[in-house]
Image: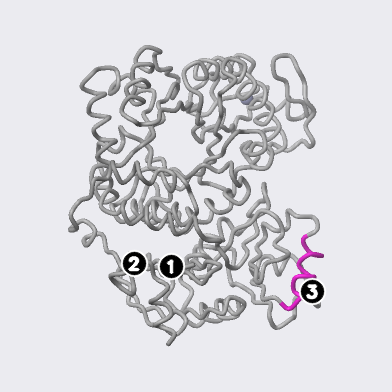
Amino acid sequence: MKATRLCRGLTLGFACWAAFSMTAAAAAPSPDLWELARQNREVHRFSTLFTAQDVRGRLSNAEGLDAAVAWCKRTGVTKVYVEQFRDGYQAEREPTLRARERFLKEGIEPAGCITPTRVGKSSTGWKNTISCYTDPATQEKVRAIFEYSAGLFDEIMIDDFWFTDCACEACDAARRSRTVTIGGQNWPVAGDTWADYRGELMVRLSREYVLAAAKKVNPRARLIIKYPQWYDRFHERGYDVARQTADFDRIWVGTETRDYGDARWGGTVQYEAFFIMRWLGNLGGEKCGGGWFDPYGTTEKTYVEQARQTILGGARETVLFCYGSLLRDTGPANVEALRGEMPELLRVAGQVHRRDLVGVAAYKPPGSAPETEARVFDFVGMAGVPLRPCHTFPSNAPAAFFSIHALKDPAFTAQLREFIQAGKPVLLTDGLAQRLGEQPFLKAPHVITLPVKGDPKSLLQMNAETLESVRAPLLRPFKTTFSAPNQVSLYLFADGSWVVENFNDQAVLVRLNGQELNLPARAWRYSWRQP
Ligand SMILES: [Zn+2]
């Protein structure tokens, strides 16, 4: 009976359990992606970016422009970001204008972008990439770049180097005097830590020399701040997701998780893309435009997994960074795999947008420090706990997960007590439990401790017994039972729809609400209830 109900809930008529492996998708007759992408651009849009260097090298002659347009159409790309600045180089006006007009004529929406690398005086931290924004000449350079861009485009993305890690003498003096100075004007800083100073500096510089400067040149200019994927360290380098999201017209989300095992780029699990997309999506609401990933350190499988997680994260657009990189190394194979999966990704995006995500609330206050529990949310998600990321205390959630991050909230302990006393299941990290100390309310039977042991990555090794003891009580309010090996993620929606994704290199057997599912390696399955 249960199985029949689930089958009826599916919108895909040809199979009860919709499983797609990449080979199956690739073998299917290739649809006209351009037409499909145009029809679906309100649901989900794929876009790409041309770096300032690619404007010079690939878009400044007729053959290059033809090739770029053809690639976009073959890849279902209906929007392009044409960059004005990167690595100290500013793209020239004439080729930029010609590219802008050509894309417009082809039905591909053009926008601008600025990557603030090598802007002026180098940072003492990440040398020759990141800049010292205390330096007045560097500040003026910022203003000039944004004024130039606003004269060319109505929409400007800022790539995720809009931060500083400089600790030069000038920065240190300004930090100690608790004063941000821009164009001769001073603003007080609330504290004397580097996080305090850099946060205030980047907020003020954004307001004065990015937003105000661009809008003075072009009142239609809309600026997008793209947040990097390293969410636990934003506050250390001047990203203030609360104030900057309020200030900017739109926000964007870095979902470039790449390959966990890659020697150069590794260490990030796939679920992080979903977590950060939902966390910032929740924070930004309508302002949240989409996600952004790249091909570095990926295989076809992990490249496509980035796309799936971005879409499950509720993104309305995916930026494929960037055209030049996608033409070399692993790029072409990645793009081919993505093209094969694109029709399915667009269908899933449509289903995701129609529904509210439900799950175990995962609370990360803005600007919270991880201490010994860096990015613990990603690993809890990989363990099959369906998370619903949030940035404010989840008082109304049916179940919740808390880590050391929550201590950023001064009202946390009182709110947690109330939450637990309401009888709702709670998962606490061992680190947080230790910090909270001997509290009678923590002894309630529905409080479960997660053994992080100061090493979140070790959660990938949790055995079946531990996984079961963590998941079962948390899933009870959702009337869901789930048993699966580690690294199989679960996503739940308010109407009973679900998604399961297997990140293992082996096929796995999963039991969801009594139903057995055989998931091939690196495959996902889903069930959408009809309204
Ligand atoms: Zn400095």
Residue 239 falls in which quadrant of the image? top right
Name the residue: 51% across, 44% down: 253
Query: Is 370 part of what is drawn in magenta?
Result: no
Task: Check disc 3 and report the residue beneath it.
Answer: 438
In terms of depth relative to the viewer, which is nearer, 217 or 486?
A: 217
Q: CA distance from mark 1 to mark 3?
A: 44 Å
Q: Amino acid under label 3?
A: Glu
The residue that appears at 37% across and 12% down in the rendered structure is: 94
Depth check: give the residue in front, 326 or 109. 109
Residue shown at the point (56%, 18%) measured from the top left = 218
Q: Secondary structure at mark 3?
A: loop
Determine contact: label 2, label 1, CB under 8 Å: yes
Direction top: furthest residue: 94
**Real-space CA distance between mark 2 and mark 3, rounded to the nearest whole angstrom:** 52 Å
Tell me the number on the disc at residue 528.
1
| Magenta region, residue range | 412-423
Q: Position of residue 258 (x, y in %)?
A: 39, 50
Query: Ligand 1 is in which quadrant of the figure?
Result: top right
Amino acid type, mark 2: Leu
x then y, percent, for residue 66 = 23, 25
- Tell whether circle 3 marks a residue whose Cβ is less than 8 angstroms from ligand 1: no
Q: Mark 2 highlights which residue?
A: 12
Measured from the top left, where is residue 268 in percent x and y? Answer: 45, 54
Q: CA distance from mark 2 to mark 1?
A: 8 Å
Which mark sits nearer the N-terminus, 2 or 3? 2
Dot 2 crowding, Cα within 10 Å, few <14, some 14–19, many 20+? some
Residue 187's x, y, as percent?
78, 25
